[in-house]
Image (spheres, rainbow, N blue to C red):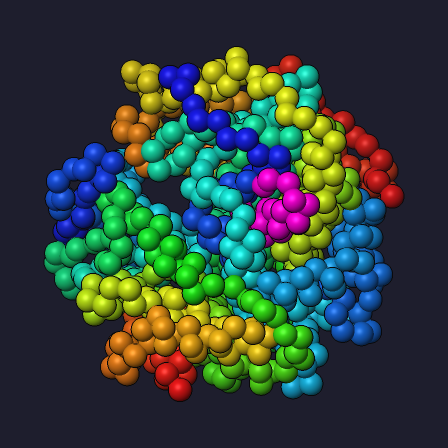
Amino acid sequence: MKIKFLIYRYNSAKKSKLKYDSFDVPYSKGMTVLDVVTYIYKHIDSTLAFRYECRQGICGTCGVMLNKKPVLSCSTQIDSTIQTQMIEPLANFPVEKDLIVNLEPVLKRYEKIKPYLDKVHKVIITKKKSNESKAFRKCIECGCCIAGAPEITQSEKGCMDPMSLVKIARYVTDPRDGLDRKAMAKKAGIDKYSDELGKKLNLVCPRGIPIDEAIKLLKQ
Amino acid sequence: MKIYKIIKTDILVIGAGGAGIRAAIEAKKSGLSVFLLGKEVLGCAHTGMAMGGMNAAMVKPATPEFHAQITIEGGYFINNYKMVKVFGEEMPARIYDLESYGVIFDRLDSGEFYTWAGPKQKHPLNVCVGDYTGREMMQGLVDEARKLKIKYTDEFFVSKLLTVKGQVVGAIGINIRNAETVVFQAKSVILASGGAGRMYKVTTNAMSNTGDGYAMALDAGAELIDMEMVQFHPTGMANTPSTLGVLVTEKTRAHGGILRNRLGERFMSKYYPKEMELAKRDEVSRSIYTEVAAGLGTKNNSVYLHVDHWTRDKILEIIPDVYEQYKNTGVDISREPMEIYPSMHHMMGGVKINEWGETIIPGLYAVGEVAGGVHGANRLGGNSIAEGQVFGRRAGIAAAKFSKKIKYSQLPKEEMEKEQTRIFSFINRKTGIIPHKVEDKLKQIMWDKVGIFRDEKKLIEAKKAIAKLKIESKKMKTRTSLKERNRDLQDCLEIENMLKTAESVVDAAILRKESRGAHSRTDFPKALEEWRKNIVVKNKNGKLVANIIDVIK
């Protein structure tokens, strides 16, 4: 059985016209999105650009849109009941080439929230204290949440993206960090995040981070 | 051609995994200029795939001496004793460094570190963050690098170290985004480019691990040590082709995971009745291999690893990522067993260094998996991402000290032009072989003939086959001449590096006529006292020369 994949093709260096190429790929049970793009690169079109590293769902470099939903391509299996499927680069990022996005604008925004432990207090960390930040420490900066939040990244210019939000939550729950992270979150537009958006983003995050809780916490 | 950008930096760090970033952080403190290069997006290096934990004597009765002692026993007594000593001593301080970068290791209610015991650990040494220790560690290191504003270019491929009169003066390579050639002129270079898992058909490694550092170090005149010592992790995923070889942490067995064969027998009782599932990695890997070879494996040629007798809560607390990895392939490990099989995991060997990361080339340092010596013939779980922190820091200090004393040297123009021609020859030649066809052949050779069990006949066959592939590889040709994201071009360069690395592994493996640690020869099944030695490989006029040296004590 073959499945038809429509793949986003664009080369920013050549300012090429955006197009979708169609590839018929033989389906095998358990096949992942990464298997599909690797198959195309190996056997059909060697110019297809995509990122991957670990196949373990942990490096955070292989995020794409599968049928308009952000996923990690190495950990997402293909639903064989859909005849024609679409693979695109992560939404809400500028595209560099094909399935590869340009991370620079996001990292520039990220810098603004000081994404590191700062003004450090010496504190004894217990299991309880460690657990408060644990869920937020699972972020792998894959960008799936950014791709899943057009209501912020497209409509609320200047507002922090969800990846920054999770990072602030990670440090607000870390007793060693001495910055006023809640004030930072307020300034960065935490009020633009609704509970519904938080719940939606929970489902998007491949690391299962409770983004709704991060929002609640930062609004307190 | 002959156009390249030149960037000057006092210290160049090649490789942005745990050891490389740690080296860059330390070097930056010296006030000198530091430039960090990574082949993948910053933060996505292979270090992040380490799961179970890292060893350090944080909680009594474990002591640094105990850590050193079991590292040497685990390495079958051919480790570099000087390196092991400082490793054990300095690990606790490196754990606190990581915590100052933001990492929070798992705790007990009292605030004491949560530790667990891997093989040989009478006293537990593994500190951890769930079963994604490496990823949190990478995040901490990246956060700190961002805080210190360390200059970096990610997705950059270094293809050659530049030397003048036997001293390293920089490196040349291409930006993966657009194939732009860049030369880095440096007073010292810290090589931290990781391992070579991709030369094996089944591996736990990230795709970036293509032996670039071993090949470049050989070309520059450095020595490689213990290259025959290739670790197979006993438990790689084996239930679907897509995830073949992906790591299942040792933490699983350390917390009561049970291995069974197709018939449901707890087969480790046949091989290591005392240690059972927690025998050393080389021992468990051989046991699984033997079971499957005897026809006692599953239909996927694997064995079972059970945690389905644990509570779901225990699974989600101890090994949440293993749970996810199998869930993504349609297996609920709280209800059914995992299928696993050994997977190429780690190069114990590598660039020969001393306890300051110094190689025999002035100005060249090596740290992390690309370096060898600390692990000997078998690496203990939890020692890999750990040692990179100790020697990364040390190399950062040593490289800064060295760089402060010297001026920039002239760049070797001819060598640079030659290298640029070599890189683009893969695009420019009219016809040729598709690169991944060469790679697939190499992977199969290494898996079949240079694997868990070896013998003279298979190794000689591998040597001949690799020599043939090296000739074939000269004809590799990219299928597109596009400069942007030309994956074939990167493949060509990486395949040449894998071939050189493979060659050094095979040569050393042929020479060691005994079985020790990860090197199991069916034709020489015993460990021999006279082989408490190291094998050193070096490039002499384009030919590999192997020598036997005394263990460094």
Position in image of residue B39 (x %, y %): 46, 42
Q: Quadrant of residue B411?
A: top right
Q: Where B108 sits versus B23, above or below? A: below
Q: Where B465 sits versus A212, above or below? A: above
Q: Quadrant of residue B111?
A: bottom right
Position in image of residue B13 (x %, y %): 58, 40
Position in image of residue A138 (x %, y %): 46, 69
Position in image of residue A59 (x %, y %): 44, 56
Is any part of residue A41 visible from this angle? yes
User: As rendered, which of B374 and B36 lies closer to the eye?
Assistant: B36
Can residue B29 be found in the magenta stretch? Answer: yes
Horizontal side of B30 relative to B16 (left or right) equals right
Q: Which residues are magenta?
A: B16-34
Look at the magenta stretch and give its main secondary structure. Answer: helix
Residue at 51%, 41% (x, y): give it: B37
Residue at 87%, 43% (x, y): give it: B553
